[in-house]
Amino acid sequence: MRKGFALPLVLAVVVVIGAFYAGLFLYFKLFPPYDIGRIPPKPSPSTQSSSSAQRDETPKWETYTSVDNTYTFRYPNGWDIRVQEGFVEVYCSVPGEVPQSTKPCDPKFNHGYFVVHKLIYTSTDEFLSKHQDQYVDVKRLTFQGKDALRVVYPGSSQSGGSYLEWVVNHRGSTYKISLIYRNLFNAKSYSEFETPNPDILSTFRFD
């Protein structure tokens, strides 16, 4: 090969290889490969319509703010509310249940009680040391950036169902937020619980 052609040929090869890798980089940037373990399940049409309906209804919900303005949440119209010192419960009920709400539960609801307790403990660790034997599937996590536990209380027909609860430390006080699933008994893990409907928890906010 003559020396006059060697340099242009090398430059051409470098340009082609560079263009190839640049194109490859751009492709994966625009169309990244999926990790199967991280792909969220595609919601069914019924789930999508249910979620849309709930978003439409939520602005019409009632709002509760604690007496000391520590937290607030929203709950469906027609649900009853019971407030005592350090305790608030909103609920709907099915015929024969006590307490009986003004408006019966919609059959599509998978839970009918949302309860918030202010506890005497100053930390989630203290709470757990006193009550660990009552709970299963205890997981330490954060709730709105705060130290928290997610716990499952197995429950029974006598207790009204299984409880999915968050124990949250907020400004030196500990709060327990409970969802009671009336159609689920003796739950052993978080995976047994459906996404709460109505989703009151998503409206809960600390100050």
Image (cartoon, helix red, strand yellow):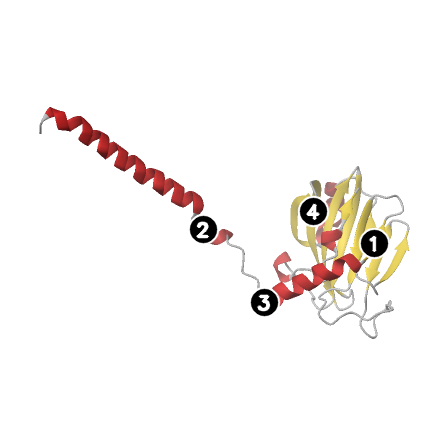
Mark 1 neighbour class, 10 Å CA radius: few under 14, some 14 to 19, many 20 or more: some
Report which residue position mark 1 lands on: 63
Q: Residue at x 76, y 52 (%)?
A: 177
Circle on res. 45:
3
Mark 2 neighbour class, 10 Å CA radius: few under 14, some 14 to 19, many 20 or more: few
The relative height of residue 27 versus residue 113 in the rendered view (above or below) is above
In primary-sequence order, the first of circles 3 and 4 is 3
User: Where's residue 85, x and y in %?
Assistant: 91, 50
Circle on res. 185:
none
Circle on res. 149:
4
Asked if residue 154 can be seen in this view, the reply is no
In primary-sequence order, the first of circles 1 and 3 is 3
Q: Mark 1 belongs to which amino acid?
A: Thr
Q: Residue at x 81, y 46 (%)?
A: 71
Is 192 displayed left or right of 31 in the figure? right
Q: Residue at x 71, y 62 (%)?
A: 54
Callout in the foreground (1, 4):
1
Q: Mark 3 belongs to which amino acid?
A: Pro
Mark 3 neighbour class, 10 Å CA radius: few under 14, some 14 to 19, many 20 or more: few
Helix or strand or loop: what does disc 1 sit on? strand
- Which quadrant of the rendered structure holds the C terminus? top right
Callout in the foreground (3, 2):
3
Report which residue position mark 2 lands on: 34
Q: Mark 4 belongs to which amino acid?
A: Leu
- Which quadrant of the rendered structure holds the N terminus? top left
User: Where's residue 8, x and y in %?
Assistant: 19, 29
